[in-house]
Amino acid sequence: MNEPRTIIETEILIIGAGPVGLALAGDLGWRGRQCLVIDQGDGAIFQPKMDMVGIRTMEFCRRWGIVSDVEQSAYNRDYPQDNVYLTSLNGYELGRQPMPSMRDEMPPPGSPQKRERCPQNMFDPILRKFAESQPGTRIMFRHEYQSFEQDEDGVTATVVELDSGRTLTIRARYLVGCDGGRSRVREQLGIEMHGKGLLTYTTNVIFRCPEFNRLHDKAPGYRYMFVGPEGTWATIVAINGSDQWRMSIIGNAQDKKIYSDEELKAFACKALGRAFDPEILSVLRWQRAELVAERYHDGRVFICGDACHLTSPTGGLGMNTGIGDAVDLSWKLAATLEGWGGPALFDAYDIERIPVARRITRFSTSNLETMKKVPSSARIAEDSEEGREIRRRVGQAMSEGLRQEWFSMNMHLGNRYIDSPINVYDEPESREQLIAEYEDAVNYWPTSRPGCRAPHAWLKDGRSTLDLFGRGYVLLVLGADGDGGDARQFAECAGVVGGALEIIPVDDAAVCAVYQKKYVLVRPDGHVAWRGDKLPADPESMLKKVSGK
């Protein structure tokens, strides 16, 4: 006789407890929603796949109140962050991009935050703690997702508890697959991925060597990039700023090699330029790819993070883009569950986030191509005039070509939602300007144009304008004569967005200069929905549009 299945009910079921799934769960819980996260692992991280928390992600951490947790992580905040190009650590240094330590780096003018070095084995526990602190959030490890069926009212998923073999049925209003590059949810939805595809077969090795930087004569760096006659063949990064290092054998798209531990140690010795015995902690063989999903949802089922896009890590944008997906989707799910979000919100998820993924994957691949196509030679390590000239050319090519990767502020803060059905675009704009902004990876120019991240400016009370956004819509009334009274019609229509509308007068000249218009309507995710020097004649219709109705 078959035992009856255990049935669990929740509002949102999230598959995958990586950084994107945890961020989505935390943000949904922060918005007062109920969600369940399941993951087939046990929560332990043996191979941190990322170590840079980008500036936009740190702005979300500020919203969630967890900046201090990131800053107090176990990463050595005094460790130098230089990017160094070499033949080997005991060979020739070809060039160096000096970068401050995390302690010394200051936030740029465009943000109240700065990027942080916090590898996944440190960042995931912070996100998990944040998610589990929300009353409506529950995380279940050692549970494997099997399949789903959806109907008009919700989604029914089948899950297996791995330790007991027991089958569970989970009934949710919505399901989100944050289950990585080999997403089972994406596969079951029949969503295809498009792009260049496979870029390299790469092998990552985490090894321990406390004295590593004492085994060579170079100034310490965060990332060492090794160039031989074959070009750039490996990198080594300071994964915790003290005794652990991640070596990546870059590889290519043709040779799927599996190296023994002895071969991997030989690669480490080649990079160092002398013999030593690294303690190998973990090995990860993976495929670097450039792929973006053709769509991000079907009915009540969504995909998010690596399930949506696969990108080379050359740029540090993979996880950070995934967390951007999560924040974009979270408020739309919450608005729909609260009854005031319309169907265009979910259409907007695809329309807004897919171009961002295409932008970051192309940018990241271009960084990889720059790194691999340096003009090397068999004589690069020769102590000769020709060898010196080759090294000069390689160093110059690396320094100039990779500068956009090291200073890619616009890739993090300059992602604009164009053609979104929930934004109001009523200003003429130059197509040439839009293309130039899209292609510029480095220069971020704050603007309140619809679709852009609402810019940061310091308020008189010491807060950032970003601290005003997140819970619901915010209508900024800017100017010395603006007390918010002239926006009374907007306030009277707040019921259209479930009362999630706040009108905030700002009379600071510096803030007004950054925001450019008298009225700026900001969405719950911090992107601008509309702006103008006059209020719309029909604010109710506008609020219906921006809420997806």
Image (cartoon, rainbow, N blue to C red):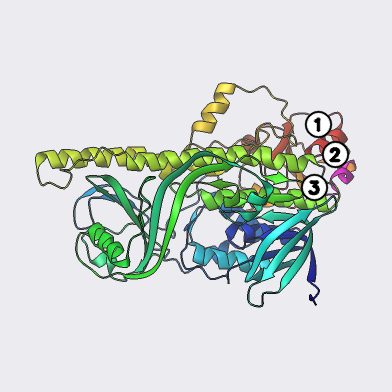
Q: Quadrant of residue 79?
A: bottom left
Of pointers 1 and 3, the one earlier in the residue sequence: 3
Element carrying mark 1: loop
> Eyeballing the image, is 26 above or below 475?
below
- Callout 1 amino acid: Leu
Q: Nearer the viewer, residue 439 or 66?
A: 439
For label 2, the residue is: 490
- Callout 2 amino acid: Phe
Label 3 and label 2: CA atoms lie apart by 9 Å
Query: Is 169 one of the magenta-colored residues?
Result: no
Residue range in magenta is: 493-502
Q: Position of residue 360 (x, y in %)?
A: 52, 41
Label 1 and label 3: CA atoms lie apart by 15 Å
Q: Position of residue 184 (x, y in %)?
A: 63, 55
Q: Residue at x 37, y 55 (%)?
A: 81
Q: CB under 8 Å between callouts 1 and 3?
A: no
For label 3, the residue is: 502
For label 1, the residue is: 535
